[in-house]
Each structure stands twice: as structure tokens, then as C-alpha cells.
């Protein structure tokens, strides 16, 4: 046997190996597409699990995110950030404490 010859060419093992390679390739592509789909649907799943008030908005942003990817990032932010709690925190940052007086 030389270094140039292929060991399985022209045998039934060649057909079996091509079949196995085709199955592995299709399974890999299908697995990658399924993983991408699950990652892309993450904001919708999070909104449903938290019974979010803006589930419709998050769903629309997620679907638009297939075309414009920055919109998907916005959907993730809306889904994972509690808007009411964040606004209360920002309000409290700007509110002065009631009992203190600042001397100039």
C-alpha cells in the first residue's frame, strides 16, 4: 500500500462511511439551528415564565430581531430587566433624603 492510495475506495465500506458522514453532517446542522432557535426565543421564554406585562412587545421585538439583530438585544433587556423596579431605583437615586440638610 502506498501513501497515495485510499483504503476504502470502491468498497461497501466506502458507501457506509459516506452515509455516516452525511448523517453526522445533517445532525450537526440541525443541532446548530435548534440551538440558535432556542437562544433566539430566550426573551419570550423569560417573559412567559415571569408573567411579564410586556410579553407581546417582547415577542414582536424577538421576531423583528431575526432581521435587525440589535432589536433582539433590546428584547433581551426588556425581558430580563424589571422596569418598575428599575424606575423606582432611579427615582430613589435622584431623591434627596428627607431628614438631612446640606450646608453650603
Image (cartoon, helix red, strand yellow):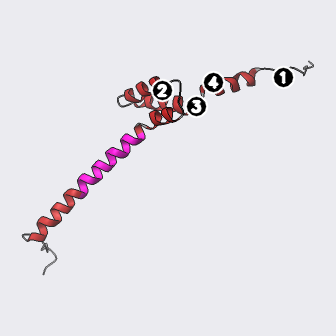
- Which is in the foreground here, disc 2 or disc 1? 2
Q: Which mark is residue 97?
A: 1
Q: Earlier in the sequence, mark 4 or mark 2?
A: 2
**Extreme residue in the right direction:** 103
User: Dot 3 corresponds to which residue?
Assistant: 81
| Residue bounds of the magenta highlight | 24-39
**Quarter occupied by the C terminus:** top right
Q: Quadrant of residue 90?
A: top right
| Label 4 crowd bin: few (<14), some (14–19), many (20+), radius 10 Å | few
User: Dot 2 corresponds to which residue?
Assistant: 55
Q: Earlier in the sequence, mark 2 or mark 3?
A: 2
- Kindly indicate whether the residue at mark 4 contacts the one at mark 1 (C-beta within 8 angstroms): no
| Label 1 crowd bin: few (<14), some (14–19), many (20+), radius 10 Å | few
- Seen at 69% across and 24% down, the residue is 88
Q: Which mark is residue 84?
A: 4
- Seen at 40% across and 37% down, the residue is 40
**Extreme residue in the bottom direction:** 1
Amino acid at each position: 500500500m502506498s501513501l497515495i492510495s485510499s483504503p476504502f475506495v470502491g468498497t461497501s465500506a466506502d458507501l457506509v462511511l459516506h452515509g455516516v458522514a452525511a448523517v453526522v453532517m445533517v445532525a450537526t446542522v440541525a443541532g446548530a439551528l435548534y440551538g440558535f432557535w432556542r437562544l433566539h426565543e430566550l426573551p419570550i421564554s423569560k417573559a412567559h415564565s415571569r408573567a411579564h406585562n410586556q410579553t407581546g412587545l417582547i415577542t414582536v421585538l424577538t421576531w423583528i430581531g431575526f432581521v435587525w439583530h440589535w432589536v433582539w438585544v433590546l428584547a433581551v433587556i426588556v425581558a430580563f430587566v424589571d422596569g418598575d423596579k428599575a424606575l423606582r431605583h432611579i427615582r430613589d437615586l435622584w431623591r434627596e433624603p428627607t431628614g438631612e440638610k446640606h450646608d453650603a
